[in-house]
Each structure stands twice: as structure tokens, then as C-alpha cells.
Amino acid sequence: MLDGILWLLNNLFFGVVNLISALVQPQLWLDWSNKEALGRFIYYGGSVEFFFAIFDLFLIIFLIGIWKREFLWGVVRGIEGFSNTIGRFAAWAGLIMVLQQVMVVFLQRIFLVAQIEIAPFGVSFSRDLSWWTEELKLYNAIIVALCCAYTFVQGGHVRVDLFYAGVSHGKKRIVDMLGSLFFVLPVMVMTWLFGWFFLWRHLVTPKVNTTDKIETVLRKTKLMKWNVETIGFSPSGFDAYFLFKVLLVAFAGMMFVQAWGFFYRSYLEYVEGEESAGKYLDKDSLEDELAETVAEIH
């Protein structure tokens, strides 16, 4: 028991030290022309040290917010604004997906086209029709991965309500805070750890394992080289499946940060009372958009 407490306190202390060290010496992990820097980036991105650095940052923001609530409201608005911006932009992938599907069917059935070639910015890009068909999965993945935090802000996720609706405002906020800490955050940490090493195993060789120590990773960097996955399910099909791994990591990261925002918001609404419910919340409203459109027409 005592060893566990000492381990926790030690990691909390060095989390701050490691965070400051990473910020003041970015060349140690961002200068990817140096293979050791790349190795450190891969290792620490899924490490205990990284977790406690982020956890310390969460605690520091929260402690400052207890003292100065307007600061914490600013953090909440920033997190929710980021989720909304990314989500609203990524949602356009749905329209692109539909238009591309219509184009593929039209060209394949009417003109019997085998390849589609485009030349954005004067650079020719030609792929087999099956490549464009399989690429539609990427648009669907973009919507799922990058719009999840946005949907969370908008209140669009399904909630299994056993007692939530019938309790008071304060108890709802307590449930929300506990849900963020003990359900969303742990699941996103596990998803990040799985997705992080899964991603890099398809980007570089030799592969970095979850059990590797930093010394082992640094030794591997002497032989490390980029080896981006370009194998598709079919010979002429979509060959950039590593992008799905990138989206998995992006999903975990965005939802992790959004869980912070939800915890902070729940705390602030608990402290400030029921009148603060939905404060600064930027939710989309179809009725408001229709009213604005009608006003512009008139």
C-alpha cells in the first residue's frame, strides 16, 4: 500500500518535471531528422511518464479553476470550441462521400470507366475505380472519429438513463463528473495506448512494442526507417489504411480532452447552481439556422 502511494506521488512530481522538460527541449522529441528524437516521440507517446504529465496538467488547470472560475470557463469554451470546429468541418466528409459514390456508380455503369484521374494543383493523380470505391470507408471513418467529441458537446450521444432524469441538478453534475473520471477517461486512455503503438507499427521499422524500455527503443533507432503501410485489401484497392490508425489516435485524443471539458463544465455548473446549466454552450439549432436563412432572404 505504502509502495503504491509512493509510486503515485513520485510519478505526479516527475510528471510536472517531464512536462516542463518536454516544453523547453522540443528538439529532443520533435526533430525527426534525428532518429533518437523519433524513437523518444514514439516511446513517450504511450508511456506512464506521458500519462502523468497530462494528468498533472489536468490537475493544475482544475486547481487554478477552483481559485478562478472564469479561467476554467475559458478552458471549457476552448475545448468545446475545438471539438465543435473539428466536428463541423469533418461532417462535410459525409457530403463528399455521397457525391463520390454517385460519381463512381455513374462512371462505372454509364461510361464503363476503369480509372479516374484528377490533377489538383497541376499534379496528376490516377487510381483504379476500385481504389475510389474503397476510399469511401475513409470518409465514414473521418465522420466517426472526428465528429464524436462534437456530438458529445451537442448532447447527441445515447444515454442509458437509470435514475439520471429524476435527480436534482447537483446530483446530475456529480454523476457527470464521476462518469468522466471513471468511465470516459480510462476507456480513452486504453484506446490511445492500443491505437498509438498500432499506428507506429505500421509506419516505422523495426517495430516498437508496448513492453520496450526507452533504452531498447533508442537501440532500435540505429536501424529505424520509415516503412509506411501501403497494402490494400485488393491489388488495385485503397492503399492508405494507415490513415485509419491515425484517425483512431485522433479520436482517442479528442475524446480524452473533451472528457476534461465535460468534467470542468460539470464542476462549474455544480458550484454555480442550476442557473449556470448550459452556460456558454455552443449547440447547433436547426430552427435558429432556418430563421437566419429566412431573415437573409427577406
Image (cartoon, rainbow, N blue to C red):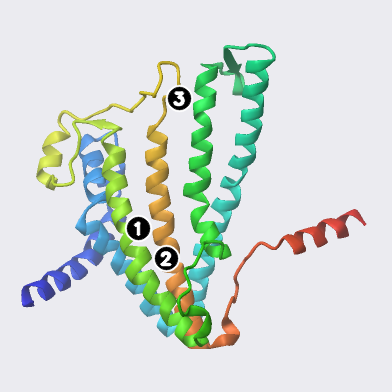
Q: Quadrant of the N terminus?
A: bottom left
The amino acid on which the numbered mark 1 sits, given as a three-letter code, is Met
274 vs 34, left or right, is right
Distance from label 1 to label 2 (Cα)? Answer: 9 Å
Asked which secondary structure carries label 2, the reply is: helix
Question: Is 88 located above or below residue 266 in the figure?
Answer: above
| Lower position in the chain sequence, tag 1 or tag 2 | 1
Density class for disc 2 (Cα within 10 Å; few <14, some 14-19, many ≥20) is: many
| Lower position in the chain sequence, tag 1 or tag 3 | 1
Asked which secondary structure carries label 1, the reply is: helix
Q: Which x, y percent locates residue 262?
A: 46, 70
Q: Which residue is mark 3?
A: 238
Looking at the image, which residue sits at the far front?
A: 162
Q: Which residue is mark 1?
A: 188
Q: Nearer the viewer, residue 248 or 51?
A: 248
Distance from label 1 to label 3 (Cα)? Answer: 28 Å
Density class for disc 1 (Cα within 10 Å; few <14, some 14-19, many ≥20) is: many
Q: Residue 292, can we see it?
A: yes
The amino acid on which the numbered mark 2 sits, given as a three-letter code, is Ala
| Lower position in the chain sequence, tag 2 or tag 3 | 3
Distance from label 2 to label 3 (Cα)? Answer: 33 Å
Question: Residue visible at 21% across and 58% down?
Answer: 49
Asked which secondary structure carries label 3, the reply is: loop
Q: Residue 27, can we see it?
A: no
2 vs 23, left or right, is left
Q: Which residue is mark 2?
A: 259
129 vs 195, left or right, is right
Question: Is 25 located above or below residue 281 in the figure?
Answer: above
Q: Which x, y percent locates residue 105?
A: 64, 23
Q: Which x, y percent locates residue 93?
A: 59, 40
Q: Quadrant of the C terminus?
A: bottom right
Question: Is 240 located above or below residue 42 in the figure?
Answer: above
